[in-house]
Amino acid sequence: MKKQSLSEEQLQTLPRETLVLLLVQQAESFRLLSDQSAAIQKQNEALIKQVEDLKEQLSIMNNRLFGRKSEKVQDIPGQLSLDIEDSSQAFNETEALVEEGFADEPEVETVVIRRRAPRPKGKRELDLKEVPTEREDHYLTEEELQEKFPHGWKQLEDEVYKELIRIPETFKVMEHHIGVYAGKGAEDTVIRGKTPGRLLNHSILTPSLAASVYTAKFVNALPYNRVSEWYAINGITLSRQVMAGWMIRIYEYYLEQVHKRMKAELFLSHIIHCDETPFKMTGEKEEGDPKSRDYMWVYHAPGRNRGHPVYLYEYDNGSRAAAVPDAFLKGYQGVLVTDGYESYHTLAKRRPADLKVAGCWVHTKRKVHEIVQAAGRSKTMTPGQKIAQEAEKRIQAIIHTDKMFKDASNEERLAHRQQSVKPLVDAYFFWVKEVLGRPDLDSSSALKRALNYSVNQEPYLRVFLEDPEIPMHNNDAEQSIRKFCVGKHSWHIIESKRGAKASAMMYSLAETSRANGLNPYKYFEYLMEQLKEYPRNNVPEDVLEELMPWSGSLPPECRKQNQKS
């Protein structure tokens, strides 16, 4: 229908009632258009906010995949600079961060020149001190010296330099000939000469070969097929199936008793760190869920005040439920330091009388750090990124303040936490809840999820304030489980539950031996040499104790000297 407009003459001829009706209709049209415009404007604002949130999430994911892994806090203009590693920048964070606002400071252009740290004197000596040294002299003969110096000579201090020579790994076959004797009497039996114990019957496996496979797979994270290729270069044919079978049988024949002793030592610790990671198992899946993921757990006793350092990997039934750590920690009384996974909190609620769960502040900081990192080098930050940056600064101040008394006595450390750290923690949670109460905060944003994580974890993040021995983070367990994660990216799969349990024990020995200052290869070789002389998993307790990684009775060649000056 073609729209028509009335001229001024036509309007003058219309009755008054008609003109009033036209005006009312026009006003209603304007109102509808205004409401429609407001709705479109509101929709546009929501879409713009959604786009910004999606861009932020995309940037966070890109940083996770391709960005730098450093969590160093960037400086905020007008605020105090904080460097955890520099103890000279100590200040009263309680006053600095609880107070609202900071005084403006004049802008100063700062040029930072980063210089490469000079090589420490004697560094090469420290690098090579564990390697056997062979001396080779290069002196002139008396005749040569007399020819060069007819008027006499004197010898100055020797000029010394060192070179590192690699001697390729060699193999040899040890062929044992056993005397067999039979008596000539009717009742005489056949006897044989005495032979040393063997790790596995009818096998070429020796302690040194077992230690070589163990070190390549569980210390250096090489998959069995690469280990097999490496042996093939030296003319040795060993399939990955054979090597995997060796490790499984060594665990089942010799190391279950060692596992029990390590667990007993773990339970002596007042604090246990715990973490878990998924992996893929190709066989023996649960019938109802063939696509379910399996999990490897790690428990770590730091050994600072009670007991010795212990890392114990555990594979149970492939579950991530609270029942798994609950069964493993049956009988343990102490503190479990973990990330924010809900199964640990369920465990704490089940056992309030004998088990406390302490949260990890590094995980909390990581949630907001990802948002800040998403800004990249951009000078303009979104309001959400600015809030996340403020949260990160506050958490960093809490960690830094606590670290200032890391070498103090337990009494001093507890007093410091109550007097200086607790006010910062109180201020942080008060500020977070205040921010979450803002009506303009997008409920679906990464910032709100990060801040909600802090609030949900608050009871567990406060536990460290009550006990000077509890650390603020779960880095110890994370660093250990990372070894398994590096390995699983190389070998990708475990084929059976027997293999998973054997792998757990091998990783446990590798990490625990290193934590106690041992050479993993030398220790494993020595352990196998000793265990093969006893009935399988039936070693006397006093002998077993002398074979544990923390034993003072281990031979010197098992020990790795600390290279730090």
Image (cartoon, grey):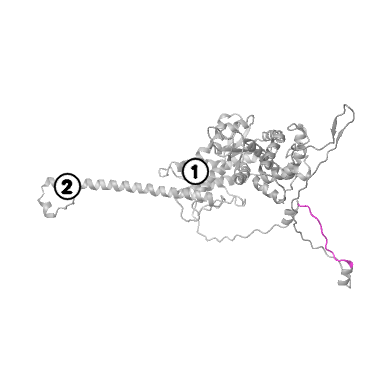
- Residue 420, position in %: x, y? 58, 43
Q: Which mark is residue 450?
A: 1
Q: Nearer the viewer, residue 412 or 322?
A: 322
Amino acid type, residue under disc 2 in the picture:
Leu
Between the C-alphas of marks 1 and 2, the distance is: 56 Å
The residue shown at (25%, 46%) is 31
Quarter occupied by residue 322: top right
Locate residue 483 relative to residue 15 in the image: left or right.
right
Answer above or below: position of 384 versus 162. above
Question: What stretch of residues is rendered in magenta?
Answer: 131-142
The residue shown at (71%, 37%) is 250
Label 1–label 2 contact, CB within 8 A: no
Locate residue 33 relative to residue 449 in the image: left or right.
left
**Residue behind mark 2:** 22
Give the mark nearest the N terminus, 1 or 2: 2
Q: Is residue 263 visible?
A: yes
Mark 2 element type:
helix
- Residue 136, position in %: x, y? 82, 59
Locate residue 555 relative to residue 99 in the image: left or right.
right
Q: Nearer the viewer, residue 215 or 158?
A: 215
Q: Is residue 163 magenta?
A: no
Mark 1 element type:
helix
Amino acid type, residue under disc 1 in the picture:
Ala
Q: Nearer the viewer, residue 156 or 525?
A: 525
User: Residue at the top extreme?
Assistant: 187
